[in-house]
Amino acid sequence: MRFPYIILIGIAVVSVWMLNGKYYQEELTLFGFAETKETEINLNFSVMIDEINVLSGQSVKEGQLLLRAKRLDSDIKFEDQEMKISEINAKKRIWRSEQEGKLKTLESSYLKKMGDVNTQIDAINNKLAQQKELYEGLDYIEANQDLPANHPSKMRIAAYEEERRNIEKRYQLDLTNLQSIIAKGTKDDDETIKRLRAEYKHVQDNKEIVVDIVAPTDGLIGNVHCKEGEHITDYRTLISFYEPNPTLVKAYVHEDYLVKVDIGDVSIDEFKISSIKDITQTYTGKVVGLGSRIVEIPARMRKVPEFKTYGREVVIRLTAKSKFLQNEKLILIGIKS
């Protein structure tokens, strides 16, 4: 008595296996659904919604007014600008303090070098004066200014005076360069602050500009994500917008199918696609995308919804304008290449 039960169980397993797509003879049949390209309409600045002229699901024409709003720039904008200006001024003060420190260091170094040279010259002159007092009255000793140019003391004084001139020259050159850097740095900061203040003034002058949102093409309104009188922050979606007719079909290929579906080169890369409700609506489509992993096939797309099955997502682009509805269930028959 157990043998007939085993046979029945075997027949049931094979039936499920065949229904879910493992058994393949001549054609590949899949279920899928139509998809249209969705565009989320938003703005890169804050607005206050004045009026909304469309409803979800409504058909619209290109250029049709969807909603009207007023551009708003909150006090945060001003605070941001003031914060930037404060940061620049603080940075400017620190930088200027550093440059003033460099000026003091340069001057201190200059004074020390000049002092050292002057000390050496004074030492030589003092020594000569002492010698003059010591030998005063002797005919061969003369005043310092009467010494010959090649006298060792005179030559040492001349060398120190040349060094003093070089120190002065280097100091003036370094001072000029540093002052030029300070002046240029200040101008850049001032120009930045001037630009920021001009930007804020422009924002204030244009803070209540009327903004009209119109349909980019013929299409359908998906969802309206705002209401009249609502303040909408920048980049928040206002309206979702769909193309008027689906251009893509998403389906799932059972993981155990013997026929390989691929993009443009092997057994099947094209499908005949029909509406479940109206078989006369039939179009062709080319495979344009394949999922990178195996996933659970949604119950709606299974041949036997009660049995979990797994497969690979496939995306097909319709080759002609269709009359399918968004998310309409479709049947796909593979065309051998």
Image (cartoon, grey):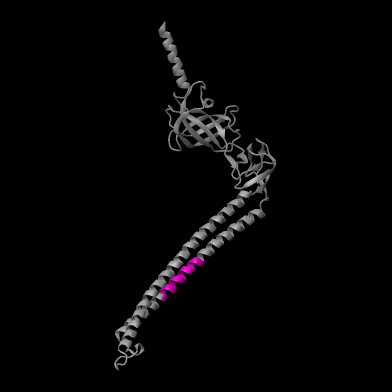
Judged left or right of residue 291, residue 149 is left
User: Which percent across, then down, holds residue 206?
Assistant: 66, 53
Asked if residue 46 can be seen in this view, the reply is yes
Q: Quadrant of residue 337?
A: top left
User: Viewer-proximal residue, 51 or 326?
Assistant: 51
The answer to whether residue 65 shows anywhere in this view is no
- In the rendered image, residue 195, in percent from the top left (x then y), is placed at 58, 59
Look at 54% across and 58% down and name the residue there: 89
Between 122 and 19, the one nearer to me in the picture: 122
Q: Quadrant of residue 148?
A: bottom left
Q: Nearer the viewer, residue 233 or 257?
A: 233
| 238 vs 174: above or below | above
- Residue 113: x and y in percent read 38, 73
- Residue 90 placement, left or right of 120: right
Q: Is residue 112 magenta?
A: no
Quick one: quadrant of the N terminus? Answer: top left
| Placement of 115 over or under 129, stated as above or below | above
Residue drawn at (63%, 49%) of the image = 75
Spot occupied by residue 182 in the image (x, y as percentages of width and height): 49, 66
Q: Which residues are magenta?
A: 168-183
